[in-house]
Amino acid sequence: MNSTQISHKPGFTLVEVIIVLSIIALSFPILFSTLFVVTRQQVSTNRLTDVKQQGDAVMNYLTTQIRNNAIQIQTFNGVNWVSACEGASAGVEEITNSTTPIYGSISFLNGETQSDSIFKVAKGQLCRQTRPDAPADIDTTLCEEALTNRSVVVSDLLIQCINVDTTTSPFVEISFVLTGAKGEAAGVDSSTMNFSTKVQLRRKTQAL
Amino acid sequence: MQPKTIHFRPGLSLVETMIFVAIVSVVFVTIISSMVGTSRIAKSDFHRLYATRYADDAIEWLRFSSSRGWQTFWNKIPSQSTETEYCMNINLGLADEFEIDEGAIIRPITSGSACEYRGMVMASANPPLPTVGPQIFRRTVKFTTTNITEPVKVTVTVSWQDSTKSPSVTSTTILSP
């Protein structure tokens, strides 16, 4: 007669399996929701860092250019480009307003080369372009020289001149709003910043 | 007749189970706490970016005010200013006049008028600037000066309320006649 060998391998009972699954079901949501919050926070901070870096860069560029090289600021009177920002009388003159929109011109002298430029918002980018014959010729879908990249959206661009008196060089005020371009998403904080500065012209602008 | 062979594999003992659960718990808690810590740092960096911008904004505005007319600027700084902290909780419009007290653009912080953690809100900004960012900041400024021919030291502090502490960003500059 052959002997009988019994190999006893106990498995999990149904109750044990249910308990394990319950513990996993409780702990995973905690883990993943925490991971979600951390990721969203990092995304918010990265976006805002980008917004601030680009805003500071644009401010630095415009401030340096206007302070050191601006020789003429002009507005369009419907027929011609005429001088503005000459400090003749105290007050504020609007040069450029992307909301209205109004476009003014700033002439820069780099060495012996003079360039007449306008600043505009084209498809959310802050752009510099050669001044056309009239503001009506400005194409807001084209960007000759982009000062910001597509990861941010520029709005409310305002350039205006603050005349103090006849003896003080005028100030040029620049302000705009930058927003992270990817828009709002669940759990991501808004990444919008205001930027504004004033530049005192080093040399009084020249009349045309 | 050969003897029966029975392979008996016992399960985990209570002690083994407890050790396993303890190890898993420690790992789990460590992961969660490090994530929470990372999130807190990221949040703090997020607020610090805004705070730095607000501090720069105030310095810019004060620089403009002093460039616009040194005599006028200096006259508006009270003589006891080294001891006084002023509240600047507004979006600074570029055309705004530099005022202490009267225009309430910069007002002294006294016992009766605390400088609230309410963020930079629109006031007399011209043109009005949109209110953006978390409304948890407060901005204060201190002036240090001796006489009109000497430079004025300006210290701008932006602080905000975090969950447990009140971090701040300080920016200092010298405005010269």
Image (cartoon, helix red, strand yellow):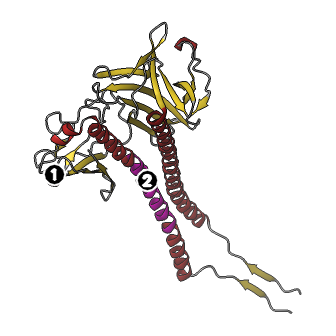
Say which quadrant the N terminus of chain B sits in.
bottom right
* Residue B12 occupies quadrant: bottom right
Looking at this view, name the residue that lies furthest to the right.
A1
Amino acid type shown at disc 2: Asp
Q: Position of residue B13 (x, y in %)?
A: 57, 82
Q: Which residue is mark 1?
A: B84
* Residue B167 occupies quadrant: bottom left
Q: Position of residue B173 (x, y in %)?
A: 32, 51
Which of B149/A22 is in front? B149
Of the two numbered discs 1 and 2 on the same chain, state the one appearing first in sequence: 2
Which residue is at a point 28% across and 47% down the rendered structure image? B176
Which of B55/B7 is in front? B55
Above-or-below relation of A110 to B55: above
Q: Position of residue B47 (x, y in %)?
A: 39, 49
Residue at mark 1: chain = B
Q: Which residue is mark 2?
A: B45
Q: Could you say whether the residue bearing mark 2 is in a helix, strand or loop? A: helix
Which residue is at a point 67% across and 71% down the rendered structure image? A11
Q: Label 1 vs label 2: CA separation? A: 29 Å
**Which stretch did the figure color magenta?**
B30-50
Q: Is residue A195 visible?
A: yes
Which residue is at a point 29% across and 24% down the rendered structure image? A166
Q: Position of residue A100 (x, y in %)?
A: 44, 17
